[in-house]
Image: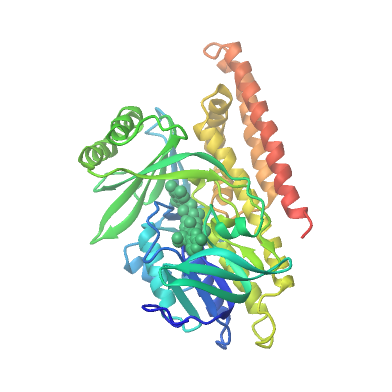
């Protein structure tokens, strides 16, 4: 069919990627670069023309920035306003003069900086780059509504758009259609998604920050706040400030701005609080609001099908690692495509062996990162004495030495993915919680009942972590 206003659409492609967001675009570019002889065809389809209007991630760890660079996106993104970023600064309530600084440059062998960019700019630049690739067809404004099946094997997609319906066959369908993935559902892949709450986002220009090139995590309010640069225009930085909100929103519409001012702003450093109050007062439209989810990593492959990006698992955005995961998925799936670059064009490009190897690799980093995001989310947001104790212990642990900070940041930035390192770090933090609960110097101003509650909370959290660590181990051992 040659749909009007669209490029000619064939009825068969080697690979159909559903979703032209970050993960789908990165994968299409990576596959096209793996196919140096230009014998393969890739269709990328997205229901939104231009970009998805959703408020999404913007802060990318060095591993992800490296993938963007390797794929030829980095320079274009910087030209479009993206900002090189240095790491994280975490501030406890009431300790604004003594934050913990976690610098990417301290991780041995790692790219020293990450990248931060307005999400819509990111996707716009990526889609524009794909339009220059001859093996890639980008089809916008079409929705995948069904899968073609040959027994257990997925072998194509059914699309609907204003021009009607298209049935397209392929050797591999890739679900890059985000956390609520239609493809995942259609393929019957288990979906254990839970809604966690909401993130409200506000763009602030001209804010004064002590660490303007870091993601500033600010604790103390009803949920963590995150402030990071998202664009640079003529040397002037714009920042994103996000507020973590519970599932039952405490206020709506204009009242939400009022609530944020009252409940969160007292915890921001003075100059930033002023800029944010000003932006909230001036804000005419609704704040950008996005639901947050936890989706424990489902199996990332099935016959004729691969899952990448959020479709293959997502967590609360507190560790800012979703996009790095999606970029690593693109990198490792394309590595399999490169291995089979020379098989004859009548053979599937990515066969079952390729998918098995991709899934083994994927299961090495996604569950570990999810376990970490869960733990940090609980510690930063939890209100009980157990969570508060873990928070205090985490800060003490980070302040106890450079090595401890580097280890934690390497896990956070997805540079370290071995589950045993995650477990070791977790146990060390738990040890700090227990040690601080019984430290004699706390005896006077930390009543026994509170200490017991802290221990109880820590043991409770440790219990859930044993489950999480078991899940991490299982995801690496489970049969294909
Ligand atoms: C508030 C918030 C803040 C975040 N902050 C960060 C951060 O700072 N750093 C970070 O790394 N991550 C962050 N994340 C996570 C990050 O946004 C995601 O990991 C990332 O966007 C996932 O990319 P994706 O391409 O897998 O999915 P998406 O970005 O969701 O893209 C999916 C695409 O599929 C298309 N699509 C969906 N269904 C269909 C269909 N049936 N047919 C055709 N097309 C379809 C959509 O239009 C969309 O373009 C954040 C997330 C949220 C919600």
Can residue 7 be seen in this snapshot? Answer: yes
Tag count: 0
| Observer-nearest of 213 and 55 | 55
Vertical relation: 323 (above or below) 147? above
Quarter of the view holding residue 155: bottom right
Q: Position of residue 196 (x, y in %)?
A: 52, 39
Image height check: is 1 above or below 70?
below
**Residue 62 visible (yes or no):** no
From the viewer's side, name the closer residue of 350 and 336.
350
Residue at image position (37%, 60%) is 120
Q: Residue at x 29, y 52 (%)?
A: 238
Q: Position of residue 328 (x, y in %)?
A: 57, 63
Q: Position of residue 24 (x, y in %)?
A: 51, 66
Position of 174 with respect to 200 (left or right) is right
Q: Which residue is at the front of the view, 463 or 359?
A: 359
| Residue at x-position 65% and y-position 21% | 456
Instruction: Please identify the residue farthest to the front as the structure is shown.
Output: 164
Give the colour scheme shown: rainbow
Q: Position of residue 201 (x, y in %)?
A: 36, 44
Q: Residue 277 vs residue 128: left or right?
A: left
Task: Give the vertical position of 97 relative to 347 (above or below).
Answer: above
- Vertical placement of residue 479 versus 408, above or below: below
Residue depicted at 60% across the width and 24% down the height:
436
């Amino acid at each position: 069919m040659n749909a009007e206003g669209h490029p000619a659409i064939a009825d068969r492609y080697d690979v159909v990627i559903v979703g032209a967001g970050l993960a789908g675009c990165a994968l299409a570019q990576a596959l096209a670069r793996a196919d140096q002889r230009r014998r393969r065809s890739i269709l990328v389809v997205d229901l939104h023309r231009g970009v998805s209007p959703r408020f999404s991630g913007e802060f990318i760890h060095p591993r992800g920035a490296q993938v963007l660079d390797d794929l030829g996106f980095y320079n274009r993104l910087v030209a479009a306003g993206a900002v090189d970023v240095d790491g994280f600064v975490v501030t406890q309530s009431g300790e604004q003069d003594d934050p913990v600084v976690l610098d990417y440059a301290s991780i041995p062998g790692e790219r020293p900086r990450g990248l931060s960019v307005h999400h819509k700019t990111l996707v716009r630049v990526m889609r524009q780059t794909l339009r220059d690739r001859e093996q890639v067809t980008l089809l916008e404004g079409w929705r995948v509504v069904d899968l073609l099946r040959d027994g257990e094997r997925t072998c194509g997609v059914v699309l609907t758009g204003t021009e009607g319906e298209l049935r397209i066959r392929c050797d591999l369908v890739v679900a890059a259609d985000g956390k609520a993935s239609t493809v995942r559902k259609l393929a019957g892949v288990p979906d254990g998604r839970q809604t966690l709450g909401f993130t409200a986002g506000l763009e602030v220009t001209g804010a004064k920050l002590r660490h303007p090139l870091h993601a500033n995590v600010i604790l103390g309010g009803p949920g963590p706040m995150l402030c990071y640069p998202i664009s640079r225009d003529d040397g002037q930085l714009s920042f994103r400030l996000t507020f973590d909100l519970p599932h039952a929103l405490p206020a709506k519409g204009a009242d939400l701005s009022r609530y944020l001012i009252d409940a969160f702003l007292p915890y921001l450093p003075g100059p930033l609080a002023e800029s944010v109050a000003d932006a909230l007062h001036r804000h005419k439209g609704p704040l950008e609001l996005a639901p947050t989810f936890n989706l424990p990593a489902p199996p990332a492959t099935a016959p004729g099908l691969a899952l990448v990006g959020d479709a293959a698992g997502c967590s609360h955005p507190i560790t800012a690692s979703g996009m790095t995961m999606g970029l690593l998925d693109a990198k490792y799936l394309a590595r399999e495509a490169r291995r089979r670059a020379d098989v004859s064009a009548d053979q599937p490009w990515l066969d079952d062996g390729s998918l098995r190897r991709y899934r083994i690799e994927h299961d090495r980093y996604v569950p570990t990162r999810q376990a970490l995001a869960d733990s940090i989310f609980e510690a930063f947001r939890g209100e009980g004495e157990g969570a508060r104790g873990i928070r205090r212990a985490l800060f003490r642990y980070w302040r106890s030495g450079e090595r401890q900070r580097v280890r934690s940041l390497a896990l956070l930035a997805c540079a370290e993915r071995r589950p045993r390192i995650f477990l070791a770090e977790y146990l060390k933090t738990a040890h700090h919680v227990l040690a601080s609960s019984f430290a004699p110097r706390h005896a006077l101003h930390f009543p026994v009942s509170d200490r017991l509650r802290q221990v109880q909370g820590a043991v409770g959290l440790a219990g859930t972590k044993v489950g999480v660590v078991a899940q991490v181990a299982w995801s690496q051992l489970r049969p294909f």
